[in-house]
Amino acid sequence: MRIPVPDEILPAERLGKVHFVGIGGAGLSGIARIMARRGVPVTGSDDNDTPFLAPLREVGVPIHLGYDAAHVADADTLVVTTAAREDNPEVLAAVERGLRLLPRSAGLAAVMDGQRVVAVAGTHGKTTTTSLLAVALIAAGADPSYAVGGVLNATGRNADLGTGDLFVAEADESDGAFLVYDTFAAIVLNVEADHLDIWGTPEAYAEAFDTFADGIDPDGVLVCGVDDAGGARLAARQREAGRRVVSIAVDADADLRAARLRTIGGGTTFDVERGGQVLGEVALQIPGRHYVVDALAALAMGLQLGFDFAALAEGLGSFVGTGRRMELKGAVATGGADIRVYDSYAHHPSEIRGDIEAARSLVGDGGRLVVCFQPHLVSRTRIFAAEMGEALGAADEVLVMDVYVAREEPDPEVTGALVASAVPLGAEHVRFLPERAGVLSTLLELARPGDVVLTLGAGDVTALAPQLLTALAERVDGQA
């Protein structure tokens, strides 16, 4: 359901009693937690008991499972997820009563009112970079508020209220939400066409990032990744417009560069250079070049905000990941080498490529990389199936599930078969499994000692990792 952004967005304290429709989602749950911690009366409903609800219950937010008009009887404002159906009884009751309706973006803007907003945008890497920046700033002595699209493993939460004046927010472009915020400073990691079901064309998508950057405070700064062509174009245009821009890169010329990347103990260590001089070293606990870019962006922003390099680097080094971003779900000892199982939210070709590269670096001698991928959205699969398949070709064994349909109607012509047929491996190494029932058994059959198994996608593929670990452990016990 699309709720329009009101002409005036009131501060959270002026919204009265706020009810969240779809409170169990990554976005709304974080906003609700911060409102509750600021003393705003908050309630919510969802049709699923998601992991995001535990941090809300710990601060006393009443949560209903299921939707009913009675849940909004004493509400003044509703914040509504885009996933809500048009016939949602709570929304219909609110419309009938003339209550204030806000989309997620306006709800977040309401809790950010009065603070210096540091927004993290880009086609890929937003959640990890927002998380890295929040952790680095905390280590450097700041106490920012933050709202992230995933759970920080270090805190078990996706949002919290700080005592400082900084608010670090993941700024989502998928529905134009990032255009609503009053942004002091921003990171744009990359600009690569996505969400064309919303934006229509790659050009319109890129123009939205220009509009977002145009809205940065004149006293603020734009940190921009320039290894990416879209990011480089954005940085150049904003510099020409007089914006203060700090470019970051691994390969390209940039104001701040990551150099001499080394894989050490399952993580990545790199030197940070500015003007040819080494500022210091950062040692990450997470693997992969794309996470180096994320950490470098967070470091650059922290430096621009006036914080110390060593303290920021220490914070980055303490970061242990975010849920569903190359998250180690577990390992099973087999008597030989372990079988390790990772899960990631990657669903765009560039994200798939980056996570497979990171996973490949974790595979030891004699092991293989086994990937199970679930395409997300009919429109995205229609446009990017060939590129998805090409990216998956860097694995050793590939399973492709059918398309996870969300906010669109199914199309019998657009299935996971389009992706599987584009994987450049021998047919014996690629399987299209349209029926979910056969996926777990096939993964169990394939996985052998020394392998890394990676489940990829933004849908319910994430449920497979714990199921596989249980099945592997049972197999080992049965062989003992």
Image (cartoon, rainbow, N blue to C red):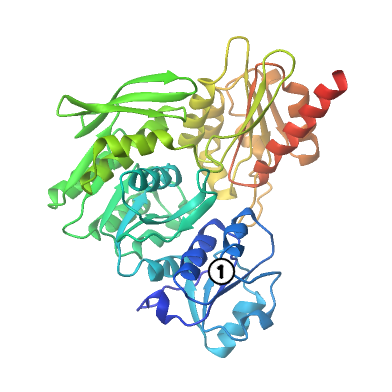
Horizontally, residue 159 falls left or right of residue 374, namely left
Please indicate, yes or no, whether residue 435 appears anywhere in the rendered image. Answer: no
Pick the front one: 409 or 321: 321
Report which residue position mark 1 lands on: 1
- Circle 1 packing at 10 Å, graded few (<14), some (14-19), many (20+), is some
Residue 179 percent coordinates (x, y):
34, 62
Figure check: 271 above or below 118: above
Vertical order, 412 against 284 (above or below): below
Question: Which amino acid type is shown beneath numbered disc 1?
Answer: Met
Q: Is residue 435 above or below residue 43?
A: above
x, y (%) of residue 390?
A: 53, 27
Image location of residue 453, percent across then percent down: 64, 27
Q: Quadrant of residue 458?
A: top right
Q: Give the left or right position of residue 222, taking residue 333 as reference.
A: left
SS for callout 1: loop
In this view, the residue in front, 311 or 447, is: 311
Q: Residue furthest top?
A: 365
Which residue reaches farthest front? 141
Residue at 59 percent across and 69 percent down: it is 60
Is 143 in front, or is 101?
143
Left or right of residue 358, residue 176 in this image: left
The number of discs equals 1
Q: Quadrant of the N terminus?
A: bottom right
Asked if residue 222 lies left or right of residue 261, the reply is left
Look at the image and tell me in which quarter the C terminus lies: top right
- Which residue is pictured at 46% across the width and 65% down the height? 34
Residue sitting nearer the eye, 113 or 394? 113
Residue 469 visible at all: yes
